[in-house]
Image (tube, grey):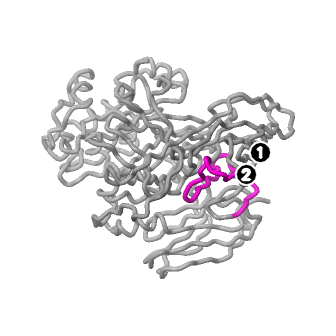
Amino acid sequence: MNNLIKMLIFTMLTGNVYAQSTYEDVRAILTTKCDIACHGDNSFSFNITDSAETLYDSLLNAKPINPYAAGNNYALISPGYPDRSFLLRKVANCISADLATHPDEGALMPENAAPLALEDIELIRQWILYGAPDTGVVMDKALIQAYYQNPSRTKVERPTPPKSCEGFQIHLGPIFYAPGEEKEYFIKYDLNIPDTLEIISLYSIFNQESHHFGYNKYINNTGVNRPQGLILEGMDDTMPGDKVFIGFSENGKSNDLPNGTAFFINPNESLDLNFHLFNPYGIPLAGEAYVNVYTQPKGFASKEVKSGILHNFFFAIPNNSQPTIINYDLPIELVSLITLTSHAHSTCTNFDIYLRNSDGTKGKMIYDGSYNYLQGFDSGVYDYQHPPVIYFEPFLDLSKPVNNGTVPEGLIMEATYFNDGSDTLYFGVTTKDEMMAAVFQYVDSSFAIPANAPWTPTCIETYIDPCFKDTTISTAEIVNSNHNISLNTYPNPSSGNTTIYYHLPNAAGSVKLDLVNLMGARLKTFIDGENQPAGDYSFAVNLESNSAGVYLLRLQVDGILFTQKLIVSR
């Protein structure tokens, strides 16, 4: 399916019908607001007054004249990669930190003129993010304008990126959603690596409204001819076997792999990011995700971590306002599990996973969908948007007698659904449908963790936020704190009284703790910029004046943000 056909389908699906393409809108911004001032420093090799076709050909995948940009493999416009598009970087005016320019990239544009409006910068970024097509409308300009004109708009806080010797950061988005809209996207992400990459940890931050954020990878060069840019679910014509599943990301939680293991990414393989988000609000929402990818030198891992997702595709949930319990056998054996979680949609009220006895009955429960493994208590609620993840330490070896003294013969999923809607529900990819799946990470057969210490980075760098020059933080401290700073509440859900706990591994010059709603509006401030020594902290709070719903605790330690969802029930 070529890009033109995909754009036509996109237009029909979204209902966006315009006389002018997004590329023509971008060209109009450049010709009317930039003119010669946008390329007066000899960074570019195009003529802004060229015809639409000639200008397009001179921008797409064209190598910049600027030596720094060329050395970093930027293109004037790199379809699907806003941060690798030199033209956007020059006019972005730090709309996001990944688009901040290095001094060697030259002056920001338009030089000696006012910066472009945020809405214009965003339209250029969206055009690139959707693959920079020369025809078709990929973005509703009114949606961008409504978002930027809303004073209460919120952004996902960017985590401190890894040091250069220990990994890199990926920024996906923003992706705009109209009120009540639900969409799921895939985007190929080329790493351009010369040799096998060993990934030892993934740390992700994304919207609380996301149903999931996950990773796949194209294998055996199958991603080479895949189109660049965002692709809607249902428009991805990837063939079976082209890519394999890596896993879903737990928001704000590091997926640290055991010593001696890693995800392997080969030079002929590309990541495939999967973002599913819905907007329950009456205002536009911008979905974003940041991924810190921590790596180690090739050869330190002797075992490859693999991932699986096993679905039950064949079920029906009647709309009889009665609980429906579904059991499903999973043929998994002779592997050692590292993590295990579940995946379902809005009518699922409970989800448990058991080891399977030899006679087909349920054995030992190994996953409780209402148990908060991060904080160590049973919440009594299955949160289908952010289901709990259990981390087996070090492994759950299914080839050994771990099922109450017997060797298990697979797994059994048991999920409970309550459908009080108007129709019977079946398997489907939207949250209006249902799912029943187990998601897990594993290594083949048994594996003993090496006794030698894991690889540790040796470089020392100072992180300076490129968009806020007065914010200077030691990267070495921040990377460690990502793994050691904890923020918890108990009980959660709470009917009014709860206790907030947090741990500081090092002294902090500024600690802030707020309660905000899902729109980002601050409701209460518990701590406002205090200097605190290392240690454990706790204090009781009363939320009886807050209505029932979902809130966020925001802990900022020396400018780095940590969040914890807090449910108030009545």
Residue 125 placement (x, y as % from top left) = 37, 39
State the image quarter where residue 4 is shown.
Answer: top left
Is residue 369 left or right of 93 when viewed as pictured? right
Query: Which secondary structure, mark 1?
Result: strand
- The answer for how far apart the CA atoms under marks 1 and 2 are is 8 Å
The residue that appears at 78% across and 28% down in the rendered structure is 424
Residue 129 placement (x, y as % from top left) = 39, 36
Residue 68 placement (x, y as % from top left) = 17, 47
Residue 499 against residue 48 in the figure, above or below: below
Residue 149 placement (x, y as % from top left) = 48, 47
Contact, mark 1 vs mark 2 (Cβ under 8 Å): yes
The residue that appears at 32% across and 48% down in the rendered structure is 99
Q: Is residue 353 visible?
A: no
Query: Which secondary structure, mark 2?
Result: strand
Q: What amino acid is at disc 2? A: Met
Numbered label attached to residue 362: 1
Residue placed under numbered mark 2 in the picture: 365
Is residue 429 left or right of 199 when viewed as pictured? right
Front-most of residues 261 and 432 = 261
Q: Quadrant of the N terminus?
A: top left
Q: Quadrant of the C terminus?
A: bottom right
How many callouts does the rendering have? 2
Any magenta on residue 389? yes
Q: Is residue 325 visible?
A: yes
Front-most of residues 64 and 2 = 2
Any magenta on residue 273? no
Residue numbers of the magenta segment: 377-403
Front-most of residues 276 and 407 = 407
Residue count near mark 1 (Cα–Cα under 10 Å), binned few <14, some 14–19, many ≥20 = many
The residue that appears at 40% across and 23% down in the rendered structure is 20
